[in-house]
Image: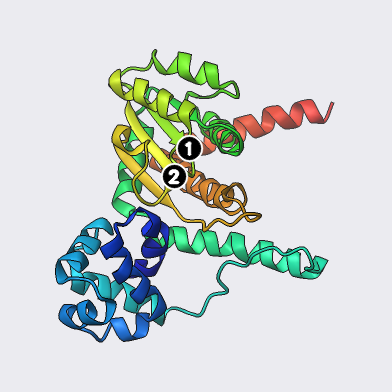
Amino acid sequence: MNGGLVKLKEIYDQLNPSEQKVAKYILKHPEQMIRMSIAQLSEVSGASQAAIVRLCKSLEVRGYQDLKIRIAGDLHQVEEQGYQDIRMQDSLETIIQNVTNNNIQSIRDTVKILDAKMVEQAVEALHRAKRIFFYGVGASNLIAQDAQQKFFRINKTSFAFADPSMQLTTSVTLTKEDVAVGISYSGETPYVIGAIKHAKSNGAKTISISKYGTSSLSPYIDIPLSISSTDSEIRSGAIASRISQLNVIDMLYICVASKDYENSVDYLNRTRKAIREVENK
């Protein structure tokens, strides 16, 4: 078990001041923290034991011992590069290496916080869905278009609209037989929130692919799929988070395809053949 440090970083700004005291100490001194009792951590962090308990609830872990186990798991993993800021004076070789490392780190951190049970529920919902609607704006719409193309190739009726107005207008037509997937790293994109809100009110199952923690999108989501990508001024979420979102889409697509493997392979072969026939003319 791991992912404790990633979760702390992801929701730090959402914590209240007393919880932030604890989180700040843990992030700076994880090796010491895993050897401490809750009383000792309370003393060195300057926060109450109640604040530590609240922090564990905010992190959605089972308690203080569970948090210690997850952080210990983080520390025992192979040392990772971590996110690197892009600076004006960086050489071409440095930028190439840093961008690559950031994308890899985003995927690694996402795997640590992605709930396998939520993925399983999402796969089952997508597999059973009569129609699937992928909603995203800007860079997230590229993810939605990629998802729509993938799922259509295994004969899953899917839609992704570049026009945000179309996303809203189609969302009111969804039924309990449909699934709506909201793609927004921040979870604060108004058009995505609006579309998912309407979809849920009409009985559709709702899935989100967004950063870990609560957001304005959260109240309308049945199945949250959390991704990780620490932002900076120049290293925006649209870079590394896009890679993490695509990775989650690939997971869902492969899992859904594997549930009906023979038919999925047949549809993939038929679509591939159709494309080759046109290209070879």
Looking at the image, residue 265 lies above or below residue 63 = above
Residue under numbered circle 2: 210
At mark 2, the secondary structure is strand
* Residue under the image location 74 percent in, 32 percent down: 276
At mark 1, the secondary structure is strand
Give percent across and percent down for residue 47. Answer: 23, 71
Q: In the image, is 251 to the left or to the right of 60?
A: right
Which amino acid type is shown beneath numbered disc 1?
Ile
Looking at the image, residue 30 lies above or below residue 110 = below
Question: Residue 153 versus residue 274: which sits nearer the camera?
Answer: 153
Residues at marks 2 and 1 touching, judged by CB atoms closer than 8 Å: yes
Which amino acid type is shown beneath numbered disc 2?
Ser
Q: Residues within 10 Å of mark 2 (few under 14, many from 20)?
A: many
Q: In the image, is 190 to the left or to the right of 73?
A: right
Image quadrant holding the N terminus, namely bottom left
Give percent across and percent down for residue 202. Answer: 30, 17
Tell me how far mark 2 sits from mark 1, CA to CA: 6 Å
Q: Residues within 10 Å of mark 1 (few under 14, many from 20)?
A: many
Residue under numbered circle 1: 183
* Residue under the image location 62 percent in, 51 percent down: 239
Image quadrant holding the C terminus, namely top right
Mark on residue 56? none
Looking at the image, residue 166 lies above or below residue 116 = above
Give percent across and percent down for residue 140. Answer: 56, 38
* Residue under the image location 60 percent in, 46 percent down: 238
